[in-house]
Image (spheres, rainbow, N blue to C red):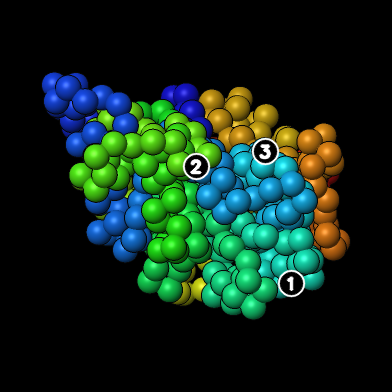
Amino acid sequence: MNIPFNVPPVVGNEIEHVSKAISQGKMCGDGPYTKLCQKWFQDNFKSPLVLLTPSCTASLEMAAILLDIKEGDEIIMPSYTFVSTANAFVLRGAKIVFVDIRPDTMNIDEKKIEAAITDKTKAIVPVHYAGIPCEMDVIMSIAEQYNLWVIEDAAQGVMSTYKGRALGTIGHIGCYSFHETKNYTSGGEGGATLINATELMERAEIVREKGTNRAQFFKGQIDKYTWRDIGSSFLMSDIQAAFLFAQLEKADEINSKRLAIWNKYYDSLEPLVVDGVFELPMITNSDMKHNAHMFYVKLRDIEVRTKFIEKMKELEVITPFHYLPLHSCHAGLLYGNFVGDDVYTTIESERLVRLPLYYNMSEDAINKVIASVKQVLLEILNEVEN
């Protein structure tokens, strides 16, 4: 049995909704299914305005335009994240300021943010790694004190909550991903921008519609639309929205299934934990509810991790590592700098490896992953001891 790292989620009613979207004769952005999805998020997550986009990358770029990020501005974020988190702001001319992460959650260390703030700082971008929330109360308090914007990169955080609030709804702007590797997909690519600061709502619709007030025109608020601002084409097609809506109808079912797999991994592997040798994810606060986006383990070092990945592959189980820290990449050196000491970002990133976890995963596949991890870990430990 060959077990891939990911299989895009399929709940069974996607084709029905996609066919209906085609028959309705409006397949471009802001069609009937787009409105249904946006309403679902607004109603369930209590965000004032949710706008579907072609990707989370597009959502982050839209946020950078909306907040008037410009050359010379500084944006604080973790280095342990996907390139889009930084690229969106670099494209506007900003300098990226990387700070260290917490080893327990792999999220930005909220205690390191304040020391990185200068008179050029414009925004903080917390990234909710693996769907585990950052310490948003502290981050929002710092932002308020220094009059900064907060853009939540919640690409991995759909259905996770922090103190009862959905990730993506706490900062001034939130950004979601519906890529095929995420818990919910709009057919391969997709995203959403959550506008939580009401003063940004009107301009957000203009920026998303190529800089025009076309959204107001379709609402009957004006008799013609014109070019009003800078912007781009940040609309998801209605066919993609139909695919996504099929999954939102079963959002709780998907979430429950993923959590069940995550919990089975944890319960089965916890007896193997040896600090510094084999570690599991940590949920540090009972007020945090994660969405089982990812199950990772940490091994002793990069050499042991490499052996682990190779041996798991021999057993036909794919277990990839994740990000290379951005501050050590070529573009990271050009467009940003690391403030403070890199105590955990690099060393923790070199230990982390991800296990297969997807909605349509069979019980046999889950059991094989667990058995394979146990077998490989035992082999590696024996090699290390000898």
* SS at mark 1 in the image: helix
Quarter of the image for the C terminus: give it. Answer: top right
Amino acid type of the residue tagged 2 in the rendering: Asp
Q: Earlier in the sequence, mark 2 or mark 1?
A: 1
Please give the name of the residue rendered at 61% of the width and 35% of the height, measured from the top-left corner: 320
* SS at mark 3 in the image: loop
* Image side of residue 226 versus residue 61, left or right: left
Q: Earlier in the sequence, mark 3 or mark 1?
A: 3
Amino acid type of the residue tagged 1 in the rendering: Glu
**Quadrant in the rendering for residue 241:** top left
| 33 up-or-down from 167: above or below | above
Look at mark 1 in the image and give the residue it sits on: 114
Of 87 and 230, nearer the camera is: 230
Structural crowding at the residue carrying mark 3, measured as other residues with C-alpha within 10 Å and reported as few (<14), some (14–19) or many (≥20): some
User: x%, y% of residue 335?
Assistant: 79, 42
Quarter of the image for the N terminus: give it. Answer: top left
Check whether the beta carbons of the residues at disc 3 and disc 1 lie within 8 A of each other. Answer: no
